[in-house]
Image (cartoon, rainbow, N blue to C red):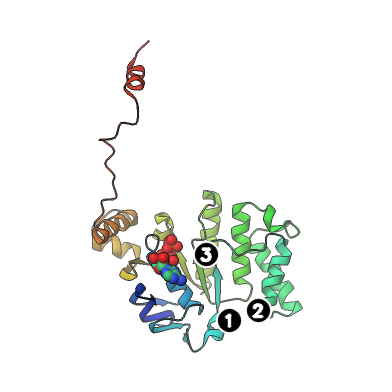
Amino acid sequence: MQYAIEVEQLTKKFGEFVAVDNISFKIPRGSVFGFLGPNGSGKSTTIRMLCGVLTPTSGKGLILGKDIVAETEEVRQNLGYMSQRFSLYEELTVNENLDFYAGVYGLDAQERSARKEELIHMANLKGKEKSLARNLSGGWKQRLALGCALIHKPRLLILDEPTAGVDPVARRVFWEIIHGLAKQGITVLVTTHYMDEAASCDIVGFIFDGKMINIASPKELIQQEKVDNLEDIFITYVETLSGINVHPDFTAIKFLSKADERADKKVD
Ligand SMILES: Nc1ncnc2c1ncn2[C@@H]1O[C@H](COP(=O)(O)OP(=O)(O)OP(=O)(O)O)[C@@H](O)[C@H]1O
């Protein structure tokens, strides 16, 4: 099997603090990998190492067979990255944002115009080419950012919480695009806190305190853990690993005054 991502004992320390702790996993080409874990568990640090912007403290990583430390330039040419904040230039138009990213990746004029047309079609941005990014709604911005990440035809796409803050329609459309890209052979690594999105991934990996706790298909994970859905797994892992009960006990707290309670109970 050919792998898009191969990670072996990857570790990142910030001083004494271990943000990513000896993780190993492999993602086959053309699959959608949902990288899950609570805030601060090490997802972005792992992604930053895979993108070649952070040097691992130890361990090894290959992206499409290229070493993330020794072959950073080759890795970047094969990789598209979309950050949580979409990395768009708000004062530039849709067209100008795409042009900017095309320039970064050195596309010539002919390639650039053909590619832009494809991406505007994919992102359903026809008619909005001259709109400022600032004036686009969340869903449009998100799809423009995806277009920018795809401008150089990368074979691996890394998306850091791409659907945070966009409405359900835009989320649905976005995921249809993601699965369409995977069908064409593009590998996708996506972080999300939405478990319905995670359930549609081919593989999900759960990271906690920098350690990879489990990695398998959603179906396998649900069978292994004998629960109904991924949300139950997420909560069970967090409770077990942190020792914190995530269900707060509200019964001891009175939110209404006695007078309010009496008024509510009055029947006309
Ligand atoms: N440059 C840094 N220096 C020191 N600590 C850092 C640095 N970058 C990240 N960390 C710490 O490493 C841990 C993992 O952070 P990371 O951003 O990878 O988590 P995450 O899973 O992406 O969280 P979120 O879901 O909130 O984006 C956190 O405790 C964070 O504070």
Find residue 209 and report its horizontal and vertical position in percent: 33, 67
| Residue 221 on image: x %, y % | 29, 63
Return the mark for residue 105: 2
Secondary structure under tag 1 reads helix
Q: CA distance from mark 3 to mark 1?
A: 20 Å
Counting every numbered tag in the picture gives 3
Residue 77, label in figure: 1
Q: CA distance from mark 1 to mark 2?
A: 8 Å
Horizontal relation, residue 28 to residue 229: left or right: right
Compared to residue 104, the image places residue 181 above or below, namely above
Q: Is residue 40 above or below residue 244?
A: below
Disc on res. 178: 3
Pointer 3 or 1: first along the chain: 1
The image quadrant where one finds the N terminus is: bottom left
x and y, in percent, of residue 30 in the image: 47, 74
Residues under numbered marks 1 and 2 in contact, where contact means CB atoms less than 8 Å apart = yes
Q: Earlier in the sequence, mark 1 or mark 2?
A: 1
Q: Name the spot of residue 73 as percent of width and height, x first.
A: 56, 85
Q: State the quadrant of the C terminus.
A: top left
